[in-house]
């Protein structure tokens, strides 16, 4: 076997192993297993580690799809998640997603575990393959008026309605909410159930984009950087400029002795 490959430069073989697709790695590491050159063997070891990591990742995501089917059954299953519950400005955003069995979206996870760039890539993939996506934003004034519990129920109902589907099961991250009759709640569902993870990603990307837009409309507040959460810069801006109509007044009492609303 070594004689068959010795004419190829070691650097070229190492590059081939590094750039190989997962489907190609197994054959390549076998082809070069008897090559005596250190550079080739180190490249083989790296490729094998990459293959092992990716197999573990695929097993993780496959388990999320299996759990979606186990909990949701064979009907129309929606995954639902929210973002912005603890924010002091901007909307509460809820997303509902229905995923097909195929293609599997490799890499989906709880949005909090993903980088912004990875979330955006996955959100685009979800948009391409999802059977339906629903979004609902509840503005700050309604949160102040109705309270967070009611706002959450309204947002879930709105997101489910926005999909245009009549689900047989709605899998939701977190504790029981009683928002829709078909609701089934899953603690840490955004890390365990494929459609809930997809909803968490789309909700996060959608709301983050909205907060960037609000940053341009409200230049006194660092909405793009803070995403509406109580960062030190955001608190400092509130103390300097007071509150704007994108703030949840009921959430901001700790930051102003006298809250003034523009």
Image (cartoon, rainbow, N blue to C red):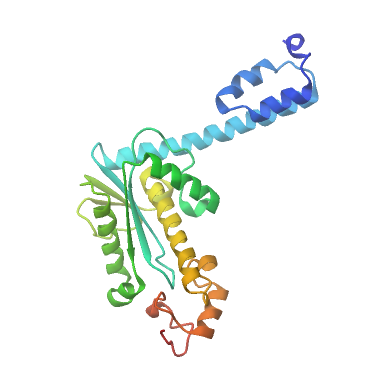
In the picture, measured across the screen, residue 37 lies left or right of residue 221, that is right
The quadrant of the image that shows the N terminus is top right
Up-down: is 116 above or below 152? Answer: above
In the picture, measured across the screen, residue 39 lies left or right of residue 169, that is right
Pinpoint residue 114: horizontal percent, then vertical percent. Answer: 52, 50
Q: 195 and 222: which one is in front? A: 222
Pinpoint residue 155: horizontal percent, then vertical percent. Answer: 29, 62
**Residue 8 found in image quarter:** top right
Number of callouts = 0
Up-down: is 205 above or below 51? Answer: below
Which residue is pictured at 58% across the width and 27% down the height?
A: 21
Q: 100 and 128: which one is in front? A: 128
Up-down: is 10 above or below 260? Answer: above
Residue 210 visible at all: yes
Q: Residue furthest bottom?
A: 258
Which residue is pictured at 33% across the width and 76% down the height?
A: 144
Up-down: is 175 above or below 106? Answer: below
Pinpoint residue 32: horizontal percent, then vertical percent. Answer: 70, 18
In the picture, measured across the screen, residue 186 lies left or right of residue 15, that is left
Pinpoint residue 79: horizontal percent, then vertical percent. Answer: 33, 48
Which residue is pictured at 60% across the width and 21% down the height?
A: 26
Residue 115 visible at all: no
The quadrant of the image that shows the C terminus is bottom left
């Amino acid at each position: 076997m070594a004689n068959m490959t010795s004419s190829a430069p070691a650097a070229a073989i190492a590059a081939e192993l590094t750039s190989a697709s997962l489907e190609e790695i197994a054959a390549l590491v076998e082809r070069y297993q008897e090559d005596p050159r250190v550079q080739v063997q180190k490249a083989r070891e790296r490729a094998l580690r990459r293959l092992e990591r990716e197999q573990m990742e695929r097993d993780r995501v496959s388990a999320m799809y299996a759990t979606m089917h186990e909990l949701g059954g064979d009907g129309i299953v929606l995954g639902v998640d929210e973002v912005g519950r603890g924010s002091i400005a901007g909307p509460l955003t809820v997303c509902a997603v229905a995923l097909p069995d195929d293609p599997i979206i490799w890499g989906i996870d709880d949005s909090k575990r993903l980088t912004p760039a990875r979330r955006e890539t996955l959100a685009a993939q979800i948009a391409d393959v999802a059977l339906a996506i629903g979004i609902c934003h509840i503005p700050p004034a309604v949160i102040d008026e109705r309270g967070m519990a009611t706002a959450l129920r309204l947002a879930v109902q709105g997101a489910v309605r926005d999909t245009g589907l009549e689900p047989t099961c709605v899998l939701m991250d977190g504790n029981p909410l009683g928002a829709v009759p078909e609701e089934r709640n899953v603690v840490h569902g955004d890390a365990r159930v494929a459609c809930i993870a997809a909803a968490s990603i789309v909700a996060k990307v959608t709301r983050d984009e909205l907060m960037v837009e609000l940053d341009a409309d409200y230049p006194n507040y660092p909405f793009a950087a803070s995403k509406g959460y109580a960062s030190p810069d955001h608190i400092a801006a509130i103390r300097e400029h007071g509150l704007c109509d994108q703030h949840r007044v009921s959430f901001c009492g700790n930051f102003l002795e006298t809250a003034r609303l523009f």
